[in-house]
Image: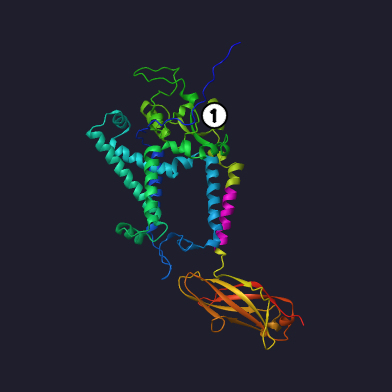
Amino acid sequence: MSSTEPVDPPPLYAAREPIFPRRVHGQFRNLKWVLMAVMLGIYYITPWIRWDRGPELPDQAVLLDLANRRFFFFMIEIWPHEFYFVAGLLIMAGLGLFLFTSALGRVWCGYACPQTVWTDLFILVERWVEGDRNARIRLLRQKWNAEKFRKRITKWVLWLLIGVATGGAWVFYFTDAPTLLTDLFHGTASPIAYTTIAVATLTTFAFGGFAREQICIYACPWPRIQAAMMDEDTITIAYREWRGEPRGKLKKGQHDPTQGDCIDCMACFNVCPMGIDIRDGQQLECITCGLCIDACNEMMDKIGKPRGLIGYMALKDEANERSGNPVINVWKHIMRPRTILYFSMWSLIGIGLVVALFMRSPIDFNVTPNRDPLFVVEPSGAIRNIYTLRLRNKAGEATEFKVSVKAPDPADQATLSVLLEGQDGNTVTVPADETMTQRVYIVAEPGSSIATSERTELTMWIEDMTNTDRVSETTVFNGRVQ
């Protein structure tokens, strides 16, 4: 009887080996530079854009005002009870990610993910300080000396400065940016601000400088989820092995008709920020950034071979390309039932949010009848009901509102009167950007049909006296049955 020795399972985590991507030029690299500049510009500059909302409201265009529980985005103001707008945007972001992944693979990861953008920026600094791939590899293997110490310290200081700018820009979204910047330099800012900047600085420094691809492989769940989003029509990066194999070194002055177009130059591997060889097929680590395409095209141009040995393609295209048949039009890959469904859902939610945004009431209020007691009988015999009115002023200045009620039967309208506790008449002034609770009395004259009915539906109207905007809400008047 034979026995086999137990085999140890493979480790769940592999120790990181530093990756030093080589500089590459091409359309995808240029696209990444443009997107990186645009996205970093938006992130760092947005808190400094001003927007005039009036004398008593913040003039920062984009502001998450947690202290007052509001969100300002240019002309839009979101209140806590309108959080469904934020929820809708998050759902749209998720559906958008599903849409792009289904159509173009991990294009988000390769071009727009914050981890990718800041890692690109850190690699740019690293290359500027230490040199291109070969120079950085030599420096890694080199013993510590004055040159290595100087370059490493310079690089780490620049990384830290980027981290500080990143953390600083983040906290500027939550309060007035110019004021906070002054307080930060004077040491008078909130401890929360300093703590947030410190945490954001250290995480940016660690994730962009050292963890890099490890975040994508081990920390981010999306590489595992993407398998459910992709199918044979998904356009992603692939190596055309039927054209490139068998690979072999290019010999000067010699041409081997049995050899494929791939000359095994390792250019695609050397530029990959994830440290993978695309010629081994689709891999979890691939972020679909297209740098291997630029590197391979550059090499094909040098040896006089057609471009496209590595390129964006769908799995369905493989059989057609192998047999020399025409490739399916790219729009047929993109416009298919799954992507149309994602786009339709994304569009419907977006349209719904826009419609809801423009249909928002200009005046926000609610009225609640007091139940204890249901009504009060005045000495004159009139019936009085008490209500609690909560009225929110969304304007940037104090606003006067008029409160009135309407009876279902016009003949009963004259038998009703409205009184506001502590106010002269039926108007109340609400301070800018605040919610006021006001007690309201509705009185029905003795003997009127409303006073002698058990329940009567009334409509309470609130009118903005500055612009005549009006909104209403239905409530109930409790009478005394004779």
Bounds of the magenta segment: 343-357
Point 23% across, 32% down: residue: 145
- Quadrant (top left, top right, bottom left, bottom right) of the C terminus: bottom right
- Please identify the quarter of the rendering in which residue 3 is found: top right
Q: Secondary structure at mark 1?
A: helix
Q: Residue furthest right?
A: 482
Whether residue 151 is visible to the viewer of this picture, yes or no, is: yes
- Look at the image and tell me in which quarter the N terminus lies: top right
Residue at 35% x, 47% y is: 163
Regarding residue 289, the answer to whether it shows in the image is no
Image coordinates of residue 332 in percent, x first then y, are 57, 39
Q: Quadrant of residue 30?
A: top left
The three-letter amino acid code for the residue at tag 1 is: Glu
Query: Dot 1 corresponds to which residue?
Result: 318
Horizontal relation, residue 427 to residue 203: left or right: right
Position of residue 135 in the picture relative to residue 438 (left or right): left
**Which percent across, then down, holds residue 472?**
61, 72
- Which residue lies most toward the left here? 146
The front one of 92 and 153 is 153
Q: Is residue 444 left or right of residue 288?
A: right
Q: Residue furthest bottom?
A: 380
The residue nearer to you, when weighing 454 against 358, is 454
Residue 87, relative to residue 299: is it above or below?
below
The magenta stretch spans residue 325 = no
User: Callout 1: few (<14), some (14-19), or many (20+) C-alpha neighbours within 10 Å?
Assistant: some
Q: Residue at x 54, y 82 (%)?
A: 423
Q: Position of residue 181 (x, y in %)?
A: 33, 58
Q: Main secondary structure of the magenta part?
A: helix
- Magenta run includes residue 345: yes
* Relative height, residue 69 to residue 195 (above, below): below
